[in-house]
Image (cartoon, rainbow, N blue to C red):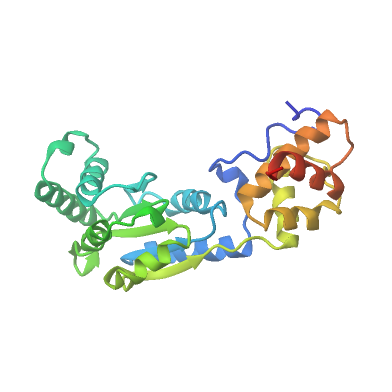
Amino acid sequence: MYESYWHLARKPFENCSDPQFYFPSESHQAALLKLRYAIENHRGAALLTGPCGSGKTLLVTMLRAMLGETFTPFVHVVFPPMDAPQLLSYLAAELVGSSEVSSQSVAQNIRLIEGFLAENTQRGKHAVLSIDESHLLDDPKTLEALRLLLNFELAGRPGLTLLLAGQPGILPLLDRTPQLEERLGVKCLLRPFGVAETAQYVEHRLRAAGGKKAVFDPSAWPVAHRLTNGIARRINRLGDLALLIGYAEQRASIEGEQLESVYHELVAVVPE
């Protein structure tokens, strides 16, 4: 709706895992380096945590693209609230590329997973199991099943790396599962953006969407950071609405005052 008015080729603040919009903040780049190290060195498990909306899924997408064909298959679980048998069945189906295993027993699925990982390792490959929203894994038996998968080794190395990506609520879960916590090769925390990175993030998204001129006035940056706490998804929501209202009001740029107005009229919910 507003793209042509702001001279953009596409909307800049969509909440999608498009690598084109990845912003290499200091925190994100550090996490990417650590996770890549863990996987490329065949560590058993790694942890990526951060506030809701901080960009964990996009970071995993970037990591997957960087790893290459040696680190396959890359199984990405996006709906983790499963019990242990369901998770093992799902994983077995993803690894062998067939849904027929869903009717098999837990023992059969475990043998299938173990056999596949052994063959995969012999072919010079290393599997990755990434579990998004892993803070929802509140069943101790499911966490224990994931830990036991790390026991499948060939030549002293695990057949897969388990990547847990979730909100900080996963930390107490790991505290209650010390055997799994001890297998974590690295732990990464995504931090919210500061004021300067908030500005850089917005400008990066605008450039990635085809923008070639300044849209936000410098007065907008401290306001944007204060209203969003430097969380990427919140910045996206506020930025999208600000561009829409700016277009409707035929503004030349978005200033801090307009961001305040947009936030209080369209984002914040204040009971009467």
From what the image shows, is residue 159 above or below residue 240?
below
Residue situated in front as seen by the camera: 205 or 271: 271
Residue at image location 72% in from the left, 42% down from the top? 272
Measured along the vertical axis of the image, is residue 69 above or below residue 33? above
Q: Is residue 64 left or right of residue 216?
A: left
Tally the numbered discs.
Answer: 0
* Residue 60 screen position, x and y as percent: 47, 52
Residue 33 position within the rendered picture, expressed as x and y whole percent measured from the top left: 50, 64
Which residue is more in the foreground, 231 or 27?
231
Residue visible at 23% across and 56% down? 121
Q: Decide if residue 237 is on the left or right side of residue 259.
A: left
97 left or right, relative to 66? left
Q: Residue at x 62, y 45 (%)?
A: 21
Q: Quadrant of residue 166?
A: bottom left
Q: Residue 27: name its quadrant.
A: bottom right
Task: Please state, as top left, top right, bottom left or bottom right, where the N terminus lies in the image.
Answer: top right
